[in-house]
Every structure is written in C-alpha cells, then in structure tokens.
Image (cartoon, grey):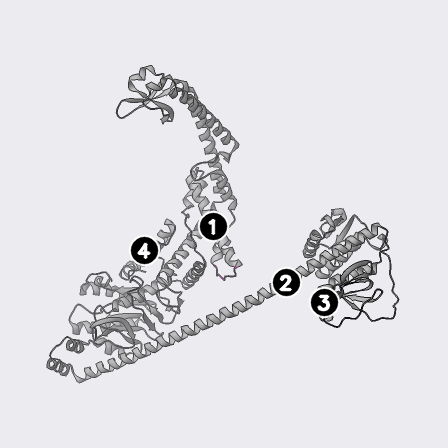
Amino acid sequence: MNQRTINTLEFDKILAQLSAFAESEKTRKMIDRDIVSTDLDEILQMINEVDDASTMLRYKAIELGGITDIKQHVRRAEIGSMLGVQELNEIRSMLNRKHMLEGVFSDFEDEEVILGNLPIYINGLPDVHFLYRRITETVDDSQVLDHASEALLRIRRKIRSEEGKIRDRLNDIIRGSNQKKLSDSIITMRNNRYVVPVKVEHQGEFSGIVHDISSSGQTVYMEPMAVVQMTNQIQRLRDEEQTEVERILYQLSAEVAEVGSELSMTDDALHHMDMIFSKAKYGARIKGSKPEVARSGGIHLPAAFHPLIPGDEVVKNDITMDEETRAVIITGPNTGGKTVTIKTIGLSVLMAQSGIPVPARDGSRLRLFEKVFSDIGDEQSIEQSLSTFSSHMTNITGILDEADENSLVLLDELGAGTDPEEGAALAISILEYLLGKRSTIVATTHYPQLKSFSYSREDTLNASVEFDVETLSPTYRLLMGIPGKSNAFEISNKLGLNGDVIERARNLSGRDNEDVNEMITALERHTRKAQDNEVETQQLLRDAEKLHSSLDSQVADYEAYKEKLRKEARADANRIIKEAEAKADDIIRTLEDMKKLGADIQEHELIDQKKALTDSYHAEDIRKKERATKKEKISAGDEVDVLSYGQKGEVLEVKDDSVTVQMGIIKMKVGMDEVKKRKKEQPKRTVSRRINKTSVKRELDLRGQRYEEALRKLDQYLDQVMLSNYNEVEIIHGKGTGALQKGVQQFLRTHPKVKSFRGGMPSEGGFGVTVVEMK
C-alpha cells in the first residue's frame, strides 16, 4: 500500500495506537513497517490467530512484558563474544515468557477451550528450558552468583573475610587516639581504597596515603598505612574474582551459542505472539470484530464506525455493496459525514488485511484488494486543510494509470474546485474510466448530475448522508440506495426567507426537479421506517438470544445438579464398600485367630462369608422391605436369614431385642429386626474340602484375563494365600500394554495383608511378573 493512502486514510494513526499495546520495541518496529498483506492465505491466518488471542483475553489477561530482541545477543555469542549479565537476563526473561505461554495454553487445553493454530507457535518450539535453569543458577539481576562455581564462592568468602578485618582495624583507628584528628568518625571509599576523613592540619601527624581532598580543602581522605597491605590483598582477590566471573560468563555464552538457532526461533515466535496479542487488545479497545475476507464478493460492514472518533460521538452506519455493485456515489451536505464514511471503508479494508479487528459489528465481510487508492484533500483529514484542483488532478492521474479490477478507489469531492458544469462532466468521465477497468469505487460529490449518472447504471449505487431539516443539522446517518438532496428551500423557509421568494425559486428550478426531491423524501421516509423496523427486529432477536442463553444456563444447572447427585451416589457407594472391606478385615482377623487355635476352617464357609459381604451393600432395598413384614416368633435353634449380611444362620440365644446367631464359623450378636425366620428345608448334601498349602499354588497366572476379572481373581487368591501362611507369591500378568500390571500393583498397594511387592528379576520373568511379600 502506498504511503499517501496510508496517510490520507489516517491508517498511520491506527498503527500508532496499535503500537501502544506492544510489549517489545522490536514488535513496535514490525508494526511501523507495512503490515497490510495482499496474500489471502496470510490474511486469513492473521485474522484467525488474532481471533484466538481475543478468545484467550476474554478468559484471562495475557502479558508478554519482558521480551526483547535477543537475536543480537545470540549472534555475539556465536562469534565467541562474552555476554554480560544483563544480556543473559534478557535471554532468561524471553525463555520465562515462553514457559509462561506453554502453561497458559496447557490451561486452556485442560479447560477444553478450542484454539486454532496459535498454541503451535509456542508448543512447537524446541525445549531449551535447561538454559533457563543454567542462567537462573548462575546470575541474578545484577551479578554472577556466589554459587556459580566453587572457585568463585571461595574467592568471595576470602574477600568478605578480608573486608571484615579491614573494617575492624579502621574502627579501632577512628575510635582510638586518632579520633580528634578526624573530621568525622566514618569509613568511606576513594578509588576502591578504604579511607578516613582527616583534618588537613593533622595530615602530617596521621600515617597514611592521601587519596582525595574535600571541596572546601579542610579535609583529606587518607588510607591508614595499617590497612594498605590488607587492601592490596583484596585487590588481588578482586582480580581473581573478575577472572573467574569472566570464565563463567564465557562458558554460559558458549552454551547460548550451542542453541543459537533454537533461541532465534523462540525470539521470532514470541515477537509474533506479541504482534497478535497487540492486535487483539487494540480490537477489544475499539470493540471491533472478526471480519470475513474473500477473493471476490462485495463489502458488508454492519454498524460500521470510524475508529479515531470517540465512541460517545461516533455514529454507526450499515455500509453494503454487493458483488455486482462496482461504485457508490455519496451525496449530501458539507460536514455531513461523507468523508468519514469513505475513510471508514478504506480503514476497514486496511485493518482486515492486516489481521486487525474491524470497526463494525460481527458479520463483516470484505473482498480482497491488492491496491487501495485515495484522493482526499488535507482539509478532509478529520483534523484540517485544503487542497487545490490541480493537486487533486495530479493524484487522480496516477490513480487512473495504476488502478485495476483488484483496486479500491476512494475519491472525495470528485471534480470539485472548478466550474460546476466542467467539474461534473470530468467526474462522470473519471468514473466511467475506472468502471471500465472494473475497479471498486466509493466517491463523494456535490454535483446533482452524478445522481442521474448513478441511476443510469446497474453497477452503480446512490447513497447519501441524512440532514435533519427541523434542527438544521446533519444526523451523520448513511442512507444506502437514496441520493441526497440540497434541502435549500426547506432550510430557507425554516430560517424565515420570504415565501414568495421561495416559491419563485421552486418555479425556476423546474417541476421535474421538485418531483425528484419529493421522491427522494419519500424514499428517505420509507428507509427510516425500514431501519426502525430493523432496530425493533434486532431487539427482538437479542431478547430471544437472551432467553436462549437463560435456558442454556438452566439446562447447564440441571446437568450440574444431576452430576452432583451422581457424585453423591458414588460417594455413598464408596462408603458402603469401605464398610464392607472393614467387615472383611474383621472376619479375616477372626479366621487367623481361629486357625492359630487349630480350628477346622472349610473353604466353602470362607466363600459364603466373602459372598455375603460382597452382596450385603447391594441388598438395602430388599432388607428394608423384609424388615417391614410381620415378625414371627424366634427361638433358640431356629434357622434365620441375617438381613444385614444376606446370610443364613442358627439362633443360639434370644435376649430382649437381640439374638446371638451362628453363621458358619462366625458367631455374632444382631438386632431382632435384623433376622427373619427361615422355612425348614430338606437337608442337602454338601461337599467341603479343607484349605491346605498343597491346594494353593505359589503363583497366580492372570494373562489373558479381562481387567475386572483379573482383579477379582487376585482378591480371592490373596485370601487363600493368607490362610496358607505363604510369605511370598508371584503374580504373572505379562507385559502387554502395562495396564494390567499397573492395575495389579495399584490393588496390592492398598491391600491390608500385603507387606510389599516388587517387579520380577530376569530369572523370575522380569516386568511380566510382580513378586508379593505377605504380612
């Protein structure tokens, strides 16, 4: 885009405001360069990236402060130069911002906020976080840290020790017999030497070296001879310190050079991000929107406004040119907003092709223009000036030479500054020439002949800026499809001009001209009514959207409530399971105690007890129903169902509201409402077998088992292992994807009877086996 167009449309002021949002000086220089693109793919990418950044900014503030141009530092490191502490800190700050953005993008991913390609700029960068750690461990904001090397730490400790000795010695001097010879009892530095202020008259009595004299000449700053050698020692240590510091910085600079290309990529990416977020922040400030840009089509800018006019003063207008419309001719009163309108169109095109949100409502559409030309006099610069006819023609001559079908041409007061008849004819000729080249044109004019010209062509549209005859002031509203009228007779009548004079003027102007003005007035009236209807429709639409949003919110609340109930149900289920596990632990402890006493433990009884515990928390509804039924009289010796365990037993004793029940090997006291008398059944033949070590293997093979089935078998197996008194067993789960191994080891980690476990040795099966040590 040529600089004249950028200046006359005041796009340079837009860029200046945009630059204020940039964090880096390098980004500001990038903005100052021509950022308007004519490559459609690049434009769409910029627009989408800025839209992503706008989405992120709606969630949280994104600050990129601290990024600088580190490429010059990288180049110095690559040629073997030593980087200073400040340069290293600038590199560290850049890497810190990269790390911050990685975290931000990760947070958005966790929140399932959909972003386009923006995260790739950062997440796709090489990982050089080790360099950030190295710099952080080596330097602070101003110097190399003591712990950067053992040698540096040792040297600085010596320096501090020597400085302490010097201060002690000097304190003795200023507090002793020499005190009366001193101007003040202070210790200061001159030329990196420790000195004390001695009165000039006592200079000869004081043993030391003069390093400075006060401005009054009454005090000399002397280094006592007692500390000269000690200070010399510190100077030698300082030299050693500087040598070691330079060695460390050279080493760190070499590490920077090793990843120079990676750092340059990071620099490019972060400055690009700074540019993107600057555009997004500027767009938010002007309340702009994301435009659609296509290679062909027209222009549609709903509720468009000039971004340099304060928001409380600007009037928004709908600007529309369909694909068949090649030119719009805007007429209307001076200072009525014609120039602002064509500048708004031009700025919107330049901003869209720079990836900047456009000053219009959502739904903006623009076609791609490879060239934008403007002829707007300096007086039209929303600030001020005036331009001559010759300068206009010189500029237009260049436009006619360069314009083509991919050009947008903006012409303000076309043909003005000369004889009206000749000026109108020249304006029509210029428009015809540009239309012949299929350029897109927006022109403003005072000439009524151009209204007729527009009506005579299908590819040209009339438009006007509205004037309120009642208030004698422009409304700045743009009326598309309606030509402007002078309103001279109405204004004169409003101002009190003699009626006969006005009537004579009407007759002189011609009846046809009056009819046209009346037609225009009717069109304006119908247009205003249509616009009012559109405003009402838009309000109804907003109300509907608000209602829809409210319903969405209610649905979301309902879903959240359902999820809350599900969570509470899961929590209740987990509580019941934990209670069941606690009961299982009690039974296991009882069995262990009984086994130690030599009890005859039968496997079917263990299985029955475990099944009872497993089923107990699933049968709450059944138990409630059964408890509600009429109770039969229960006596010792009766067979009963113990409802709280879902198991049968024999009543041993009945006492008040409780009974003692024998359930297999377990004897338990429960409430009377926890038991139900069983009907007598024919005895069934049962087969039992004792658990012994020979029936339980020292290994369990879970390969090929489904996950849930494998853990169920593991649970049963560990119960049997515990009763068999094995100290160590092997669980064979295979390698596979590792899911079963992880599940097995997670189960073992929480099992109360497992002391420890480990992966198998190569001779035991390696990672495909877990060896378990029992308590």
**Towards the viewer: 445 or 678:** 678
Mark carried by residue 16: 4
Which sits earlier in the primary sequence, circle 3 or circle 2? Answer: 2
Task: Describe the element under mark 2 as helix, strand or loop.
Answer: helix
Q: Pointer 3: residues within 10 angstroms few (<14), some, or many (20+)?
A: few
Image location (x, y in percent) of residue 235 = 42, 25
Q: Amino acid at mark 1?
A: Lys
Viewer-nearest of discs 3 and 2: 3
Which sits earlier in the primary sequence, circle 3 or circle 4? Answer: 4
Q: CA separation, marks 3 and 4?
A: 74 Å
Residue 236 in view, yes or no: no
Task: Describe the element under mark 3 as helix, strand or loop.
Answer: loop
Viewer-nearest of discs 2 and 1: 2
Q: Pointer 1: residues within 10 angstroms few (<14), some, or many (20+)?
A: many
Q: Is residue 387 above or below residue 189?
A: below
Determine which quarter of the picture holds residue 591.
bottom right
Mark carried by residue 98: 1
Q: Which residue is mark 2?
A: 570
Mark carried by residue 619: 3
Q: Amino acid at mark 2?
A: Arg
Residue range in magenta is 111-117
Q: Pointer 4: residues within 10 angstroms few (<14), some, or many (20+)?
A: few
Image location (x, y in percent) of residue 603 = 83, 58
- Is 452 inside the magenta-drawn segment? no
Q: Amino acid at mark 4?
A: Ala
Task: Describe the element under mark 4 as helix, strand or loop.
Answer: helix
Q: CA separation, marks 1 and 3?
A: 57 Å
Which sits earlier in the primary sequence, circle 4 or circle 2? Answer: 4
